[in-house]
Amino acid sequence: MTIAQVAKKIVNECLQVKEDEQVLVSAWNHTIDYASALALEVEKAGGTPLVTLDTDEMFWGHLTKVSETHYGRPRRAFLSALEQTDASVFLGGPEDPSGFRKVPGDRLAKSFESEKAVMDKFRDRKIRSVDLPVGQMTPQRAKTYGFNLARWRRITDNAM
């Protein structure tokens, strides 16, 4: 399935985006092609996309270089955006998961706990969401997990 076909299916069939709906697309540096295709399909459906970008450098820096005292800061701008969000698509996570080995579990737990307000907002507002694992199907992850990347992609494509 092509990236354009995946985007069309996600926007029109899975999320059923309607006129004037606001759609959040959470991208990573290695998923920009998907984010772009999804944003275009949202526009074609009459919706308005908001694309956010995470990078491996930012993600690992947050987990290893930012003081844990900063983890609980409210993400006011993001929470405000969610007040107007009707649907969302998540495009994976860090390209290379090997960094998780370098992060102490308690530090990782504190970071994830700090996202509770965001997750609560998704649930409370009943924001329609799709977690599209394309950003997790990377050569680095396949190697780390001992997966055959081509087979992994084929299985995921077939599931879609």
Image (spheres, helix red, strand yellow):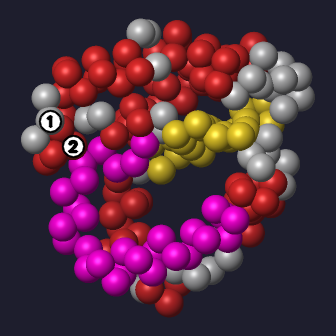
Q: What residue type is labelled 2?
A: Arg
Would residue 77 be seen by someone viewing this image from the given angle? no
Would residue 136 be seen by someone viewing this image from the given angle? yes
Looking at the magenta stretch, what is its main secondary structure?
A: helix
Q: Give the range drawn in magenta.
A: 92-120
Q: Quadrant of residue 115?
A: bottom right
Q: Residues within 10 Å of mark 1 (few under 14, many from 20)?
A: some
Q: Name the residue under label 1.
A: 147
Residue 152: horizontal and vertical position, in percent? 24, 27
Q: What residue type is labelled 1?
A: Phe
Dot 2 falls on a residue whose secondary structure is: helix
Q: Which of marks 2 and 1 is in front?
A: 1
Mark 2 and mark 1: Cα distance apart in space: 8 Å
Query: Does the magenta run of residues contain 24?
Result: no
In contact (CB < 8 Å): disc 2 and disc 1: yes
Query: Does the magenta run of residues contain 113?
Result: yes
Residue 29: horizontal and vertical position, in percent? 41, 40
Q: Mark 2 points at which residue?
A: 141
Residue drawn at point x = 30 percent, y = 34 percent: 137
Residue drawn at point x = 26 percent, y = 79 percent: 104
Residue drawn at point x = 78 percent, y = 16 percent: 45
Q: In this view, does 114 lie to the left or right of 86?
A: left
Q: In the orientation shown, which residue stands out farthest toward the right?
A: 20
Q: In which quarter of the image is residue 147?
A: top left
Residue 128: horizontal and vertical position, in percent? 71, 40
